[in-house]
Amino acid sequence: MEFENVILSRRSIRSFTDKEIPSQILEKIMEAARLSPSFQNRQCWRFIVVRDENIRKKLALKSGLIGKCNFFIKDAPVVVVACADPSKSGTMNDQDYYLVDVAIAFQQMMLTAWNYGIGSCWLAAFNEQKVKEILEIPSKIRVVAMSPFGYPKEKTSLYDKALKTFAGSKKRLPLEKIVCYDKWKK
C-alpha cells in the first residue's frame, strides 16, 4: 500500500476474522515499534504480545473500566499491551516522555499492521491494575495502551457500530481548527 493511502484509510477495527497473523508479519509490526524514536533513544517501551486465547479472554472480560467495553478484543488473534518503564525515559518541561515514546512506537505498529491489511484499535479504557495482574507485570512498569490486532471482518457487528458511535471515531476537526502558522491563533 502507498504510505499516504495507509494514513488516509486507517481506521479503528473492532470486528475481526479468526485468521491468524503470520509470524513474519507480526515480527515486522514489532520491528516498526523497535525502530521508532524515543527520548534520548532510551527505548523505555516494552510490548506484551498476547496470542493465548484464554489470556485474551481474561483481558476482554476483566480489564475494562466500564463494564465489558473491551469485550471485542477476545476475537482478535493478537492483543498487544504497550508498557513502559518510566525510569528508562525522561522528563522535560514537566512532561513524562515515556508516554510519548510508547505512543510513537504504538502508532508505528498500527500503521505497519494496516499496511498488511491488519486492523487495530487503540484502547485506553482499561483498568491498569487488572491488566498488570492478568499479565504479571511488575509494579514499576506502566501500562500505557492496548490494542487488538487482526484481519477486519467484512460486516461489522451491532456492538462494533455502537462503540464507533460512542467513540466518535469518524469525527475529525478541520485543519484550520488544529493548525496555526507562526503564532498561536485564538
Image: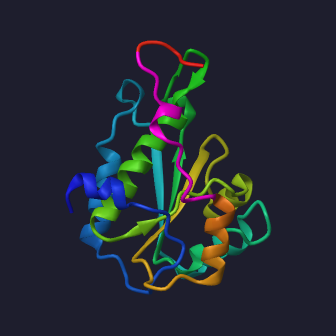
| Quarter in which the C terminus is drawn | top right
List the single residue furthest toward the right: 67
Compared to residue 129, the image places residue 93 above or below, namely above
Q: In this view, does 67 lie to the left or right of 8?
A: right
Compared to residue 182, the image places residue 165 above or below, namely below
Q: Does the magenta stretch include residue 78?
A: no
Tell me the magenta residue range.
Answer: 168-181
Residue at 67 percent across and 73 percent down: it is: 162
Residue at 61 percent across and 54 percent down: it is: 137
In this rendered view, identify the residue nearer to me: 177 or 19: 177
Query: Can see residue 185?
Result: yes
Q: Is residue 171 magenta?
A: yes
Compared to residue 172, the image places residue 166 above or below, namely below
Displayed quadrant of residue 171: bottom right
Q: Position of residue 14 (x, y in %)?
A: 54, 72
List the single residue furthest toward the left: 2
The number of numbered discs placed on residues in the rendered structure image is 0
Compared to residue 51, the image places residue 91 above or below, namely above
| Quarter in which the N terminus is drawn | bottom left
